[in-house]
Image (spheres, rainbow, N blue to C red):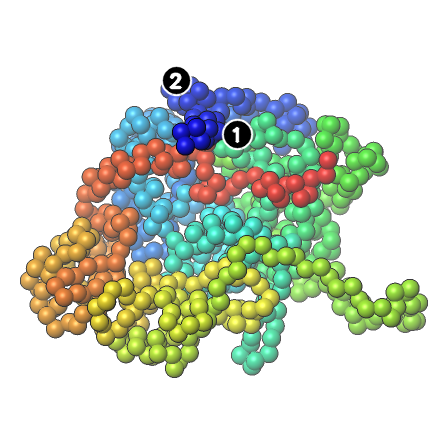
Amino acid sequence: MGRKRGKKQSKNASRTDRSHMRTEDGSATYTDIVKTNTAFESYYKAQGIVPDDQWDDFMHSLRTGLPVAFRITGYLPESNHLLNIVKSEYFKGLLSIGENGESPGKPTALPWYPNELAWQLELSRVMIRKSEAYARLHSFLISETDTGNITRQEAVSMIPPLLLDVQPHHKVLDMCAAPGSKTAQVMEMLHRKSNSLLEGVVVANDVDNKRCYMLVHQAKRLHSTTCLVTNHDAAAMPNISITKEDGSLEVLKYDRILCDVPCSGDGTLRKNIDLWRKWNVANGNSIHGLQLRIAKRGLELLAEDGILVYSTCSLNPLEDEAVVTNLLLQCEGAVELVDISERLPGLVSSPGLSTWKVASKDMTFYNSFEDVPECYHTQIRGHMFPQPPDVSEKLHLERCIRILPHQQDTGGFFVAVLKKTSPRLPWESQKEEKMSNPSGASGEPRALSTNAGREPIPRKRRRIQGYKEDPFVFLEDTDDIWKTVRDFYKVDSSFPNTQLLGRCQQENKRNIYLVSKTVKNIIETNSDKIKVINTGVRVFCRCEGKEELACNFRFCQEGLPTIYPFIGERKLYISKEDFYVLLTEEYPLETQFSHELQEKLKDMAKGCVILICTACPGTEEEFDIVLSGRRGKATLRCYVAKQERVHYLRLCGYDVSELEKRDRKKKPEENVEDHTTGEETVKDEEEEEPVPKEEQEEDIIV
């Protein structure tokens, strides 16, 4: 046993022991990676993406670590209050740093993000270890990220959802959604005017089954009934049908589509430093075709007057302007580029390129496809080259925007906003004509092929990967579970109980979820057509324990804000002092509460209750905190996770510094590894990353 253990330790030593890769102050990692790539510099100098007088600043920025960026969830009732807490308690000492000039540790609000809800600052391991103020801020970010009130996301990654201009009634598709930061932002925008049940829907799709579960984790933090996570190849995304009020079917067309395609990811060099040694021209050339297919399918699924945002975290024009050019040419006027240069005041960017150069993997540049040797025809295609000046002028590629790292201390990014001006795309019209006129345009019958009379060859279907998902079973009006819940909690008759579902066929369901009307329509109409990974927010769950209760189902904290307006009874308004007892004690006795609350509990039957406390009373920020609780024989407790308890105590103005210190002591190093962006970053928390290896290898031709 001892030998085996020793071998295992030595085998994993190279992964875990990185002390030899750090400098004395601990600020550098992966010292074996030199942040220089001659081919990278030669390629982008030739492309002219940066003016000559800014080149040194551009390269210097790429070689420095990426700042931490985060945004506050904007639609919650406590959002403004949480922002004030951040600025007054966690930024107070940091904002005074370098008042006469810029300082790397000073938090700055992103000038182009609405209502000061997004910030960025440098936050390295050294700063966290040496400064109590930075350590507190770091713990705060981790805690609030877990509860869904803050999202850690790279600054440039926040731009595409803002340009979508999502409204509450919109049907939105995120084609390549994992790990889910942009999807979460889209869901926030869907709920920004109302937190009730909405008509809109967000279909969050990803081809990678494992990454879909990462996406589910992000979506569940926001407790929305409108999100539907699917697992399909974006380039072959299936048509989804919806049932109209008259019972007829129609294909769902989306009002907004986010097309953040897989890419070579060289705009993320500041956080994915391994790219310095891996970067080569072939990566961009090989993935161009996949990007084009995904974007083209997105336009097919887009409704007339709908908006598609195409984005990459790549600087390569073959992945950016070359793809947009091909889309515009193939659409023949059915799609146009939207000018977004003034849409986000305060954002510094560069216009899209109208000319670029195409190179082979040996760094030979070609002016036209005719100059390309035949051996490279599988890697370099004719449509990768820029169009003549008279054609490119009509395409208005300058309406695209490029974000360069040195402009506002961010990563590199590319965004183009496309508007569909026609209900049909040219190739869709041609397909319809062929189907309606199989004999050809001349009207003469076509010659029979040699395969005439044979059975058509069935199209090979892609094998679905991953786990087999549990079914989605909607509750009926006559369901015993619904009757019990309705009668015990006096649920209002306007509550859409037919949108409740379970994940098993048996009657003894443990969890009950609520989805929006549109999500239910999609699931029921397309059960055999799409692979749904997850949807809905959990609103009821079966009570554990042997104690007999009038209703065996209790409220779930994540779904309570949604169903709270429909509940008629079992509500308790409590004081701030009683609220503190609930959140700091696990099983508080009734005698620990105020006399007023004890009187309210006397005539209340055992079972689940809704506990309501008003925060910031008498101010403009006043809002109610609603918790799920349980009245026992002699106790009153709340069903709230530990990290959420810290959040609610913070909102009520209580000092949580001791609780933060306790959490830091529990996992001091793990949190630093997972939530700081110095030289190393975590892909689960940050949105932008290079295309996964398996997707790269699929299209790379060596």
Q: Nearer the viewer, residue 386 or 178?
A: 178
In which quadrant is the N terminus drawn? top left
Mark 1, residues whose alpha carbon is within 10 Å: few (<14), some, or many (≥20)?
many
- Which image quadrant is residue 190 in? bottom left
x 36%, y 46%: residue? 145
The outermost residue toward the top is: 24
Say which label, 1 or 2, has the lower sequence index. Answer: 2
On the image, the x and y values in percent for residue 455 come to 81, 68
Q: Secondary structure at mark 2?
A: loop
**Image vertical order of residue 298 relative to residue 277, above or below:** below
Q: Nearer the viewer, residue 550 or 274?
A: 550
Q: Nearer the viewer, residue 300 or 333?
A: 300
Three-letter amino acid code at the position of disc 1: Ile
**What's the mark number on residue 451?**
none
In which quadrant is the C terminus drawn? top right
On the image, the x and y values in percent for residue 425 come to 70, 61
The answer to whether residue 513 is left or right of residue 330 is left
**Image vertical order of residue 377 relative to residue 555, above or below:** above
On the image, the x and y values in percent for residue 90 come to 28, 38
Q: Secondary structure at mark 1?
A: loop
On the image, the x and y values in percent for residue 373 come to 83, 33
x 25%, y 47%: residue? 646
Q: Which residue is mark 1?
A: 273
- Which image quadrant is residue 579 in? bottom left
Q: Which residue is mark 2?
A: 24
* Residue 623 visible somewhere in the drawing: no
x 15%, y 71%: residue? 604
**Image vertical order of residue 436 relative to residue 132, above or below:** below
The answer to whether residue 600 is left or right of residue 269 is left
The answer to whether residue 156 is left or right of residue 299 is left
x 48%, y 52%: residue? 213
Three-letter amino acid code at the position of disc 2: Glu
